[in-house]
Image: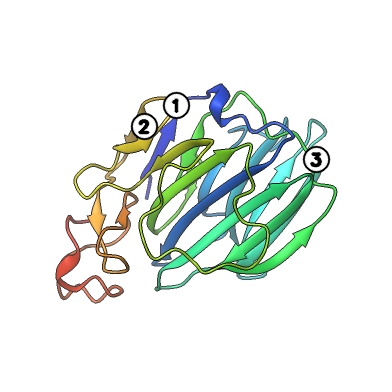
Amino acid sequence: NGDYLSIADHADLDLGTGDFTIEFFAYARTSSAHAGYIGKRNPGSFNNNSWRIAYNDTYDNINLLHADSGANFTAASAPAPGKDWTHYAFTRQSGTLRVFRNGLKTSEATGWTYDFSNAYNLLIGANVTASYFFDGFLSNVRIIKGTALYTANFTAPTEPLTNVTNTKLLCCNSSTSATASTVTPGTITASGNVFASKNELTASIVLAIPGITGGQGSGYGDYSADIKGSGT
């Protein structure tokens, strides 16, 4: 659909080899191969410390894929979302990578000391700028550099995410602007027809990625009268 958000490369988004947390809420209208949720990757070849979280149609999951300078891939995954709100968290603590879906750990792997720093832009709602777009909604996207916020099973958030220590990005949380943020290292740019909306999970968690025609009675999800805006 060509709709996504982007932020220019910045040191705050270069996660290096240390601890981190990448989390968001997702609602997928449809799921297509390689559809990107969030990532910071080479728009050409997938190499040079590229990383992205995207849909894997072979296993019906979303995975965090990293490629080193030699384009050697390593992945960790969780079951994909459907037409319901799902919280995801990808955390690294001292080289241990954990993936959580609605607070439950779905995978864990040691040896994740890979460098997550590169010179590419951060994309939200796309894998690369020319293709593999996410069809649905994303909400409360948060990146924490230097802290693995979740290391064991937890109760999934039912309130909007907040600016905790080491938060470098907290966006997709405004009911009026798709490019607004609580924390950002740079300007958030919208491409295509990106809009802000409101859903009833918390009555304040807000979306910034398009993909459906909105409005009461649209038949998509549990938005009812709370949805605002319209998609493509």
Mark nearer the viewer, 1 or 2:
1
Q: Are marks 3 and 1 in contact (CB under 8 Å)?
A: no
Residue at the farthest front position: 165
Point 67% across, 61% down: residue:
77
**Residue at (24%, 77%) from the top-left corner?**
219
Residue 8, percent from left and from top: 47, 25
For residue 30, above or below residue 162: below
Residue neighbourhood size for the residue with mark 3, other residues' Cα within 10 Å, grouped as few (<14), some (14–19), many (≥20): some
| Residue under numbered circle 1 | 185
Assign the C terminus to one quadrant of the image. Answer: bottom left
Disc 2 residue crowd, few under 14, some 14–19, many 20+, Cα 10 Å: some
Q: Say whether disc 3 or disc 1 marks the residue closer to the N-terminus.
A: 3
Is residue 208 visible to the viewer in this orientation of the structure? yes
Tell me the amino acid under the disc marked 3.
Thr
Closer to the chain start, of discs 3 and 2, is 3
Count the marks. Answer: 3
Spatial CA span between label 1 and label 2: 9 Å
**Dot 1 crowding, Cα within 10 Å, few <14, some 14–19, many 20+:** some
Asked which quadrant contains residue 17, the reply is: top right
Give the Cα distance between marks 3 and 2: 29 Å
Q: Is residue 140 left or right of residue 95?
A: left
The residue that label 2 is drawn on is 188
Q: What amino acid is labelled 2 in the image?
A: Ile
What amino acid is at disc 1?
A: Pro
Q: Is residue 33 left or right of residue 82?
A: right
Secondary structure at numbered mark 1 = loop
- Of tags 3 and 2, the one toward the viewer is 3
Tell me whether the residue at label 3 lies in contact with that at label 2, contact meaning CB atoms closer than 8 angstroms. no
The answer for how far apart the CA atoms under marks 3 and 1 are is 24 Å
* Residue at mark 3: 113
Q: Position of residue 67 (x, y in %)?
A: 74, 40
